[in-house]
Amino acid sequence: MTKQTLTITDNRTGQTYEIPVQHDTIRAMDLRQIKVKEDDFGLMTYDPGYKNTASTTSTITYISGSKGILEYRGYPIEQVAGSASFLEVAYLILFGELPTREQLAEWENSIRFHTLIHENMKELFEAFRYDAHPMGMLISSVAALSTYYPEAKDVLDAENRLLQIKRLIAKMPTLAAFAYRFSMGFPVNYPDNELSYAGNFLNMMFKMVEPKYRPDPALERALDILFILHADHEQNAGTTAMRVIGSTLADPYSAVAGAAAALYGPRHGGANEAVLEMLAEIGDVKNVPSYIERVKKGEFRLMGFGHRVYKNYDPRARIIKQAADDVFAVTGANPLLDIALELERIALEDDYFVSRKLYPNVDFYSGIIYQAMGLPSSMFPVMFAIPRTVGWLAQWQELLLDPEQAIARPRQVYLGECKRQYVPIDERG
Ligand code: CMC
């Protein structure tokens, strides 16, 4: 049998070290023994952006970037998105197995039970400026929830953790819809617990004066699928933020606020908002080739293209493209779709994109669907944060139960000035 070790020769000293290899990985701490002098700190790795560093083991989500595979707990994304409901997938992601019919009914009930938020929270929303971005409101309001549930700090208690997990999954759509309604100047809608998770969200978003909101079944299912596709994606920036904050044993509301803040950026969950701005700027299919030329010159990036992990077509983008047809059958076509399709067609034939393995990612088509559903682009990152809360919470729980995990505290390579004398202000040149 081949030896599962790595032999390293330090050419500075001529010394050789044998380091165990497990799961194609060496432990960074095994490098610490490699020293020139006895009192050296020991060898470290330098990895800005954690491009080649595994921060954890995990059993939640599997991605093969080269093959374009995404699985939740071993189930291919195509199968769960094709057959399951979002809350069923949430159960799978959180607890590791698909629920039985009874388990699912109990789980759905327990989420419904927690959909309301404290009435005082409305004053928090009212305090925002009239044009506040709903993602800023969502981040702030979920952080504020920690003050309503101070017992959530007891993160090492399993029962307490489960209660906060249910509350967060139940209340995120309510906070999101409240943020939207306040930003539009509309009165808020309370949850309708007779509806599904996605159906109730549409109700809280779009109900006006009708006594009972009945979501269009095609839109409700399309939204459910979009939620499933966004539920988890292993150690991305938002999830890493969740784990970093969680590693300090902060309460999950504060940790979710931090994760959502990471998601807000245009290189992460803010990308679908940027995609729509880009498509609107291109304006017409005939302008696509000149836009691509500018991307290739490095003037800006093609938003919704490229991924740190996928070096193949993002499987979520493929499913979203199908869901788009169902939505457009109800809402009528979005004219931006033609521009998106042309961008994709040209980019996938162009050597710049082919050689860098840049393919459409999940955000390339999701914004077009959300816009067709009547959502302003400022709501797009919010639409990402609602389902991703499930993944954040599953990863947070996994972290807390992992005896190998410790407070996240990376090292640095200091390249600044060496010790020097303080200069009084009058003596500085
Ligand atoms: N358009 C044009 N060129 C690109 C793009 C793009 N969208 N993405 C990467 N490149 C080029 C980049 O300029 C570089 O070229 P070169 O080697 O000549 O310098 C090469 O491809 C590698 O790029 P990188 O920045 O090293 O790749 P990364 O893995 O660090 O970045 C990314 C991944 C998603 C941040 C990046 O592809 C990007 O900025 N994409 C646009 C924003 C976007 O769509 N984000 C959503 C990500 S998916 C949703 C999510 O999970 O949040």
Image (cartoon, grey):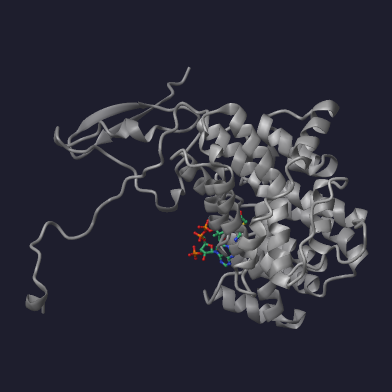
Residue 412 location (% of width, % of height): 30, 49
Residue ID at (40%, 38%)? 407
Q: Is residue 11 above or below residue 216?
A: above
Q: Residue furthest top?
A: 1
User: Where does the C terminus fall, quadrant-wise?
Assistant: bottom left
Residue 118 lies, in percent from the top left, at 67, 51
Spot occupied by residue 135 in the image (x, y as percentages of width and height): 62, 62
In the rendered view, tell whether residue 36 sits above or below residue 215.
above
In the picture shown, does residue 229 fall above or below 379?
above
Q: Quadrant of residue 329?
A: bottom right
Q: Is residue 32 left or right of residue 310?
A: left
Is 176 on the left-hand or right-hand side of 259? Answer: right
Q: Is residue 230 visible?
A: no
Q: Nearer the viewer, residue 49 or 6?
A: 49
At x 92% / y 53%, what residue is drawn?
Answer: 217
Q: Nearer the viewer, residue 146 or 279?
A: 146
Q: Residue drawn 74% across and 62% down?
A: 365
188 left or right of 137?
right
- When asked about the image quadrant of residue 185, the answer is bottom right
